[in-house]
Image (cartoon, grey):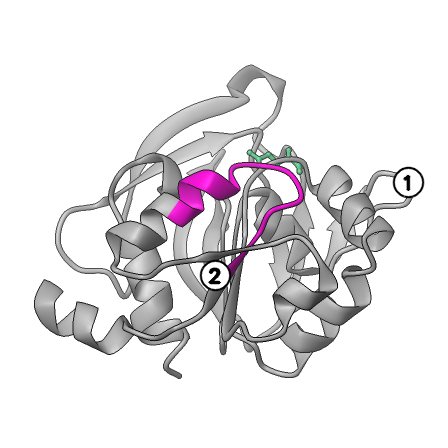
Amino acid sequence: STSIGRTGLVGMNVGVLALQGDFREHLLALDDCGVTGKLVKTESDISGIDALIIPGGESTTISKLAKAFGLFDLISKQISDGMPTYGSCAGMILLAKSIVDPASDQDAFGGIDMEVRRNAFGRQTESFEVDLDFKAISGSPIRGIFIRAPWVESHGSGVEILASIEVSGKNHPVAVRQGSVLATSFHPELTGDNRVHRYFLEDVCKK
Ligand code: GLN
C-alpha cells in the first residue's frame, strides 16, 4: 500500500543525472513517491547518493558531457560497485554493455549485460504509445511512451526481461533488470504513473 511504501522510502538519497534530457520529470516522479531527488551535475554531487536515475534525452550528448564534466568513470565505477541505477530510454542506452552502431565517441557506463540498438523502432514509428504487461508490477498495464526508443538487441542469461514488444513476429525486450540495475526503453516519467519508479525504489534498490 502507498503509506507503507512511503515510510520505507524516507531518507533515501536518489540522484538524477542532470546533464541533459528529461531529468526534471524524473525528479517529479520521485517527488510523487515521497522521495526528494538530488540533481547530479558534478563530481561532488555524486558523493552521498544511494541510487541514481539516468534520464531520457540524447545518449551521445549525455555521454560526452559526462566525460567533459569528469563524471563518466566515476559513475561507471559506482554502478559496477553496486549502486542501484535506473535508466529510461537514453538512460537504457547508457546502461548497456555495448551499443549497436554507436555514434563516434559514444560510450556507455555499463551495468547490464546487454547490447542495445538505438532508434530501434525505425523512422516510420519514431514515437508511439502502447500498453505493456510489466512483470513484477501488478494491476493495470504500464503505459509505454516510446520516443526514438532503443530496444535490447541481445543479452546475457543474468538479465531479467520485465516487458517486451513484438515486432514482425520477434520479441524485443523493452524493460530489463540485472540485480540492482533497471532499464526501460520507454518513459514512465512522462505518464504521471509512478509505479515503475516505485518498483525501482522499493524493489531494485532494496535488493
Ligand atoms: N534516441 C535517443 C538516443 O539515442 C534516445 C531518445 C530518448 O531518450 N527519448 O539517445
Q: Earlier in the sequence, mark 2 or mark 1?
A: 1
Above or below, comparing residue 92 to residue 43 in the picture = above
Q: Element type at marker 2?
A: strand
Q: Residues within 10 Å of mark 2 (few under 14, many from 20)?
A: many
Could you tell me if residue 186 is visible in this image? no
Q: Which residue is tagged 1?
A: 104
Residue found 77% across the figure and 52% down from its top: 66
Question: Residue 176, position in %: x, y?
Answer: 48, 61
Range covered by the magenta-colored residues: 15-27
Asked whether 143 or 194 is in front, the reply is 194
Q: Tell me which amino acid carries mark 1.
A: Ser
Residue 83 picture quarter: bottom right
Could you tell me if residue 124 is visible in this image? yes
- Left or right: where 66 falls relative to 152: right
Question: How much space separates mark 2 and mark 1, taking CA atoms?
Answer: 26 Å
Residue 9 picture quarter: bottom left
Residue found 50% across the figure and 45% down from its top: 185
Asked whether 150 or 168 is in front, the reply is 150
Asked whether 1 or 122 is in front, the reply is 1
Residue 148 picture quarter: top right
Residue 176 - label = 2
Q: Element type at marker 1?
A: loop
